Amino acid sequence: MKEANGGVTAPGGFRAASAAAGIRYTGRDDMAMIVSDAPCHAAGVFTSNVVCAAPVRWDRRIVRESASREQVRCVVVNAGIANACTGQDGLDACEKTAEAAAAALGLSRDQVLLASTGVIGSPLPVDKVTAGVRMLAEQLSDSPEASEAASKAIMTTDTVRKEIAAACEIGGKTVTIGAISKGVGMIEPNMCTMLCFVTTDAAISCDMLDKALRYAVRDSYNMISVDGDMSTNDTLVILANGRAGNPEITGEGADYDTFAQTLRELLIMQAQKHAADGEGATALIEAHVVHADTDENARLLAKSVINSMLTKAAVFGHDANGGRILCALGYSGASFDPDQVDLTALGEAGEVVMYRAGAKVDYDEEFATQVLSGKKVTLLCDMHAGDAQARAWGCDLSYDYVKINADYRS
């Protein structure tokens, strides 16, 4: 993978815009639009929460129907209000938003995908949203600045914007993939987290695009957590308009492998930004499980460590409390021999072995505190059971997490 400049406007034929619609925030943009100049093949993954937002229901229908998923042209996003738990009014708001975008761009409403983020249960002010759609349509640009502005507009409690682009060679052509995303709280996915929008100029069939997306999400967005709460609005969609001119990828092979691997690496980098920017976070935690017996167990073990509230609190306190990590491994659901496990913490100051063969090692507590005091802490869990490994990412649990979420609606 070769990193490229920009985000969703980096691939050929894509434009973006942002606008201040005044949905909930004042003094900032709170809507974004991404448009392709040509019809796109689309794929998406969404929250598995039974309580899902109206735009999730809208998008699922479009990306799962054979006719509509080959003709998508636009994504409209609003921040501030989630349009979740809003009943029929929420579905009506989706319809009116899509119709407004279609009218402004000369499309049909089924060519428009939607996403919302923010407060759950509040009605979406449709008049403000549709007015925002018209403003967005007038400001579309393929500049890097347009993607940057869109990445800022979709933020809620994020402290930094999340944008990335990368290029690879497929069939003698340069294929570019770009993304913007948001989400730093209510993150415990069973597919992805919060909102992520990916564009590519690759020529690829809908089926292979869907396959590549699910492969990439497995090791990226499915392996992060901030607080153990799954959102009602999780949406990750990818649009492919074929402008790169590569031979269309219609099956497995070298071209598919290149595309899928590039997408995977890009989404891993993007997913880590979510974990590092977790609400109130001061450190990124990486759980790296090695020598597990199966891939599935490696993933279970790694996710269990980064989901452990006690482990997260220990990292925040710079406390090398390996017993909490062993405990989290033990209730993960994976089977292993605890008397074989080695635990090592790695940070900017170096590394410290905390447990060897399941027993605590006599280490320098002061140095261990230094190891756990950096911006990134890696918890290496050697299971001594096989050849499988997995990585998961989370963040520490600080006092500010409670403050942010106690005041979220006020």
Image: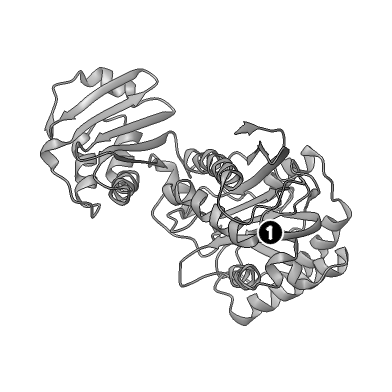
Q: Is residue 103 above or below residue 217?
A: below
Above or below for 374 versus 331: above
Q: Which residue is mark 1?
A: 78
Q: Residues within 10 Å of mark 1 (few under 14, many from 20)?
A: many
Question: Mark 1: which amino acid?
Answer: Asn
Q: Quadrant of residue 114?
A: bottom right
**Residue 56 % position (x, y):** 59, 68
Nearer the observer, 216 or 88: 216
| Front in this rendered view, residue 159 or 357 | 357
> On screen, 187 above or below 387?
below
Where 8 falls versus 355 (above or below)?
below
Can residue 236 be seen at all in this image of the molecule?
Answer: no
Secondary structure type for disc 1: strand
What residue sits 82% from the left and 44% below the top?
Answer: 142
Is 195 on the left-hand or right-hand side of 226? right
The residue lying at 50 percent from left, 63 percent from top is: 47
Q: Quadrant of the C terminus?
A: bottom right
Going by the image, does 405 lie left or right of 108? Answer: left
Residue at image coords 58%, 79%: 87
Residue 25 placement, left or right of 282: right
